[in-house]
């Protein structure tokens, strides 16, 4: 075989081999209708697979980014000494000065010992900004744990009830680990308190109740929704009594922690997975002056009479 004939043969062989490799995916001349439809369906499946890969890759990137940022902020908060707030002239908590330099909307730091809850708390002019914004201002679906915009938390004044929101992340960042409390007496006994530092002082809160609740009136038989997040000012006697009554009625746990109207409260709210939409909410009250921060959990029990949701309505 001549050299030119050999090269021509090899070229034709490579072309045929390439055509054979792509024949299963790409439409070729002479394909019948059934084969064309089959290849179009295969192409669609390939595109969906690629799209899913991109989405999963993006989710993994955002998750890792959130974890790294939270870790660096924790290390920063724990490592620096206190200072003076240039705006108020008051002494601020260790770590708060550095966090404020990174994000002036920082209002505090929340931590539950022995859990993944350990990060800064911010507050914006609305409750939308930090749903998808990281502490450093970048976009992230995990968002940032934030204080309700209506709450007051300064060196001189704070709201009766501080309502704090965070996403229920599958990777357990933000408030993703709060689900461990659900109907779990032993987890509560191991973690009965929350530390919440404002920029100016450190406070310990004793958990006294938690539950899953509906969000929309259509999810209930009577149309009544306990709008716990709107109970920020508890100075009115009747309003306070309604607040505590609704909590006691629904709480999955009986803690033995007493409450009174003069207490300062902390409410943690996150999405729940029982149905859509639903919320898991934890309620705590601040340790009183002269009171021990220790909690006697020996008498704590699950609440067999807790009011729960009606599946016949929540699934409608």
Image: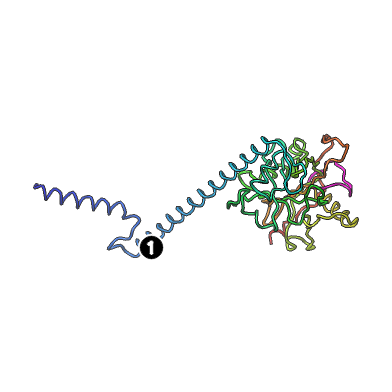
Looking at the image, residue 294 lies above or below residue 102? above
Q: Is residue 126 left or right of residue 71?
A: right
Q: Quadrant of residue 297?
A: top right
Across and down, in percent, residue 204 comes to 79, 40
Across and down, in percent, residue 101 comes to 65, 46
Mark 1 Cα-neighbour bin, 10 Å: few <14, some 14–19, many ≥20: few
Across and down, in percent, residue 169 comes to 63, 47
User: Residue, x 72% and y 56% (percent of image)?
Assistant: 311
Magenta: main secondary structure equals loop
Q: Nearer the viewer, residue 169 or 304?
A: 169
Across and down, in percent, residue 183 comes to 74, 43
Q: Nearer the viewer, residue 91 or 225?
A: 91
User: Residue, x 87% and y 43% (percent of image)?
Assistant: 258
What stretch of residues is rendered in magenta?
252-265
Q: Is residue 4 magenta?
A: no
Looking at the image, residue 93 lies above or below residue 11? above
Q: Nearer the viewer, residue 141 or 309?
A: 141
Element type where label 1 sits in the image? helix
Q: How is the structure coloured here? A: rainbow
Looking at the image, residue 33 lies above or below residue 178? below
Q: Is residue 264 magenta?
A: yes
Which residue is identified by label 1? 37
User: Residue, x 40% and y 58% (percent of image)?
Assistant: 43
Number of callouts: 1
Looking at the image, residue 199 lies above or below residue 26? above
The single residue placed furthest to the left in the displayed view is 2
The image quadrant where one finds the C terminus is bottom right
């Amino acid at each position: 075989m001549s050299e030119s004939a050999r090269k021509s043969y090899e070229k034709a062989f490579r072309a045929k081999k390439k055509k054979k490799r792509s024949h299963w995916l790409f439409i070729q001349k002479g394909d019948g209708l059934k084969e064309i439809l089959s290849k179009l369906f295969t192409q669609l499946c390939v595109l969906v697979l690629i799209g899913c890969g991109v989405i999963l890759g993006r989710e993994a990137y955002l998750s890792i980014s959130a974890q790294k940022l939270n870790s660096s902020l924790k290390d920063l908060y724990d490592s620096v000494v206190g200072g003076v707030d240039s705006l108020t002239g008051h002494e601020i908590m260790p770590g708060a000065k550095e966090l404020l330099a990174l994000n002036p909307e920082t209002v505090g730091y929340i931590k539950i010992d022995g859990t993944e809850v350990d990060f800064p708390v911010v507050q914006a002019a609305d409750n939308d900004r930090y749903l998808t914004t990281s502490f450093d201002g970048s976009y992230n679906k995990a968002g940032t744990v934030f204080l309700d915009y209506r709450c007051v938390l300064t060196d001189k004044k704070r709201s009766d009830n501080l309502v704090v929101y965070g996403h229920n992340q599958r990777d357990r960042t933000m408030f993703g680990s709060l689900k461990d409390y659900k109907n779990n007496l032993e987890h509560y006994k191991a973690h009965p308190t929350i530390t919440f530092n404002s920029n100016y002082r450190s406070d310990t809160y004793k958990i006294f109740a938690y539950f899953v609740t509906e969000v929309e009136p259509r999810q209930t038989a009577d149309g009544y929704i306990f709008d716990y997040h709107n109970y920020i000012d508890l100075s009115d006697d009747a309003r306070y009594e309604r607040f505590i009554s609704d909590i006691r009625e629904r709480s999955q746990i009986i803690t033995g922690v007493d409450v009174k109207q003069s207490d300062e409260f902390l409410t943690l709210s996150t999405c729940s997975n029982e149905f859509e939409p639903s919320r898991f909410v934890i309620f705590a009250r601040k340790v009183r002056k002269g009171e021990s921060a220790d909690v006697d959990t020996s008498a704590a029990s699950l609440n067999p009479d807790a009011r729960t949701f009606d599946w016949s309505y929540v699934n409608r």
